Image (cartoon, rainbow, N blue to C red):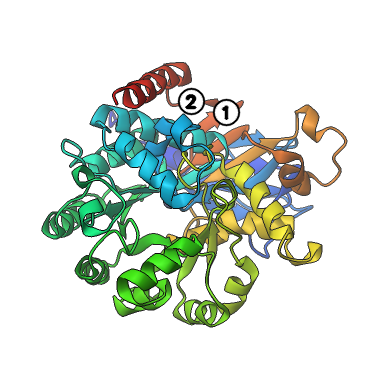
Amino acid sequence: MSTSAHPTPSQSARNLWIQQPLACFTANQQDAGNGIVISGDRIIELVATGSQPQSDIHHTFDAREHVLLPGLVNTHHHFYQTLTRACPPALNKKLFPWLQTLYPIWARLTPEAHASATELAMVELMLSGCTTAADHHYLFPHGMEYAIDQQAEVALKLGMRATFTRGSMTLSQKDGGLPPESVVQTGQQIIDDSERLIKRWHQQDDQQLVEIALAPCSPFSVTPEIMKASADLAQRYQVGLHTHLAETEDENDFCLKMFGLRPLDYLESVGWLNDRTWLAHGIHFNDAEIQRLGQAGTGICHCPSSNMVLASGICRVNELRAAGSPVGLGVDGSASNDHSNLMQEIRQALLIQRLRYEADEFTHRDALSLATTGSAKLLGRGNIGELALGNKADLALFKLDEPRFSGAHDPLAALVLCGASRADAVMINGQWTVKDKQWLGGDINELMARHQQAAKTLYRAG
Ligand SMILES: [Zn+2]
């Protein structure tokens, strides 16, 4: 008999049937009405309505009271901002004054506070059914040089998939930018560290949890040289490019004044208009710009709550999708949303898009597809975001067991319309991370206490 600690092939291939869900959204045309079969970290079978699994089954998860979704994918966030939710001096402001109010507080960020913010935000997302998160961190005050390494370590500890986008800023107030000088870096520091992070973390773990992308905070917070160098580096290492664009009309004016170009023209001039790029917000594009984005395959991350809170406008999701741009969903940073609940964000997307389109032109399925297939496309991850053969076993299961669902008839529509917010069970890479609505990876009360203390210290330090 073997004494090896490693599982034998038959043990590692134990098959789990997520059996007979109340409803199932595969995010594609396939039928998994009777559930899916998981082996290890993969989906090995979709069981059609009325069918039985063809695979051997060793375990079952009774899903008769659950709505089964692919794990949700969040494509824009700033985890550190969970430390400044509902922050008094920043309340009721539009984007630029909001940023200028918060930058001096954020400039005091410490590694300890950032670690607890990253963990809290990722767990908060996970409890809402999110299994893959992208974060955009662009603050590197003294002492925070290893902020992204710290985040990658948290993701591996939690067993959660994440794309960490290495943000950057070179232009401070003295150069006509918005942030204080203490949070910006030199071009050389940014490029050297971007390359170091790609080599250290991008696709380096065997579960495909952590990826890196390059992400100047906005095209107006770095020099054109950094925009171009980031695009070259992304091309060389085959990683994604991310930034904020076309969030407000102020930004159009700012860009015209600074570069004599509209934001998209400037983006193209620095080599970013391609399918490696996804842009947060993407609201204030004209018709011709939408066609150019679509032809280039450039993605847009729709952030409905943040856009509503900052009174920024409404993303033209249907025109972008029709033109060929993939559109995903993001909760955005917690100083402008102020929650990190991706399931609630799906509902927000439905509601705000209904203000732009006819009721039948943007359905609950369209809203769900943003946070699944749309978001996965933005991150360039081909094996998540839908329930399909061979895809990673990343799942979210919701129960309709709260008063808000009582009397609902269509279970899938009920998730969006009645406002589901907390998953009953979440699986990432074949491992349960949430069961019975509880995070299995640690003590949520200890994490909240640590995070709350860090938030108080950061705010009061001024
Ligand atoms: Zn943002």
The residue type indicated by label 1 comes to: Lys
User: Where is residue 460 shown, x and y percent of the image?
Assistant: 34, 22
Disc 2 marks a residue whose amino acid type is Leu
Question: In percent of the image, x 20 and y 38: which residue is there?
Answer: 144
Does the closest atom of ligand 1 sit within 8 Å of the Cβ of label 2?
Answer: no
Mark identifier at residue 435:
1
Dot 1 or dot 2, earlier in sequence = 1
- The image position of residue 412, as x and y in percent, is 75, 48
Q: On screen, 97 above or below 314? A: above
Residue 374, compared with residue 286, is above or below; it is above
Q: Which mark is residue 440?
A: 2
Q: Residue at x 72, y 43 (%)?
A: 415
Q: Quadrant of residue 180?
A: top left
Q: For the residue carrying disc 2, how many other residues have a C-alpha within 10 Å: few (<14), some (14-19), or many (20+)? A: some
Q: Is mark 1 within 8 Å of ligand 1?
A: no
Q: Is residue 1 visible to us here?
A: no
Nearest the eye: 245 or 401:
245
* Horizontal arrangement in the rendering, residue 216 relative to residue 43 (left or right): left
Residue 451 in the image: above or below residue 200? above
Q: x, y percentage for residue 259?
A: 31, 74
Q: Is residue 11 above or below residue 29?
A: above
Q: Secondary structure at mark 2?
A: loop
Q: Is residue 150 visible?
A: yes
State the residue at coordinates (52%, 39%).
Answer: 340
Q: Can you tell which quarter of the image residue 111 is in?
A: top left
The image shows residue 51 at horizontal and vertical percentages of 75, 53
Q: CA distance from mark 1 to mark 2?
A: 7 Å
In terms of secondary structure, where does tag 1 sit? strand
In the rendered image, the quadrant that contains the N terminus is top left
Are circles 1 and 2 on residues that touch, CB within 8 Å?
A: yes
Q: Residue at x 47, y 67 (%)?
A: 299
